[in-house]
Amino acid sequence: MNAMTLKSIKHHFLVMLAAFIGATATWYINHEMGLGAIVANGLVGVVASTFLTRELAGITYTASFVGMSSLHVIPSLQRGMIAGLIVGIILLLTADIYKGIGGKGGTTAALATIISKNLFSFLR
């Protein structure tokens, strides 16, 4: 493997990890700790922007929108984790689409939430 491939693998892993943590942590703070969606999203966003690079903080914050979903949409922590992985995959697949244009984070999170909800319904 050359250095570019290893760098790419590391980048993909960090994107997936940031998305997973963003959605999972927000879901947990929102539902298990009972602090609500807005507080959960804000906490995750502030922590991400404090400790991560700008790109990874944006990814974490985007995934955090998924964790804000109600229990009717994402009913368990495990499903929140899966939804976090789904948003990570979508972010990787659409990295160059609308780059630098506002609204991509919310649209991506909404798409990931819709896909997750439909996947969970299908797997019942």
Image: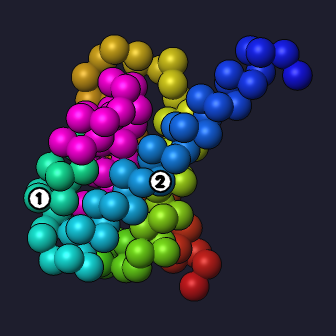
**What span is in magenta?**
46-70
Evaluate whether residue 87 shows in this view: no
Element class at badge 1: helix
Residue 63 included in the magenta stretch of the image: yes
Q: Amino acid at mark 1?
A: Val
Tell me the quarter of the picture where residue 89 sits.
top right
The amino acid type found where label 2 is placed reads Phe
What residue is rendered at 51% in x and 18% in y?
96
Q: Is residue 50 magenta?
A: yes
Q: For mark 2, does the 10 Å Cα neighbourhood hold few (<14), some (14 to 19), or many (20 or more) residues?
A: many
Relative height, residue 76 to residue 49 (above, below): below
Give the residue pinned by disc 2. 20
Please name whichever residue, 108 or 27, is drawn nearer the observer in this view of the structure: 27
Instruction: Tell whether 96 sits left or right of 69.
Output: right
Residue at 54% across, 54% down: 85
Q: Quadrant of the N terminus?
A: top right
Residue at image position (37%, 26%) is 53
User: Marks 2 and 1, Cα distance to the nearest angstrom?
Assistant: 18 Å
Where's residue 42, x and y in %?
15, 49
Residue visible at 53% across and 64% down in the picture: 82
Residue 27 lies left or right of residue 14; in this view the side is: left
Q: Nearer the viewer, residue 15 or 10?
A: 10
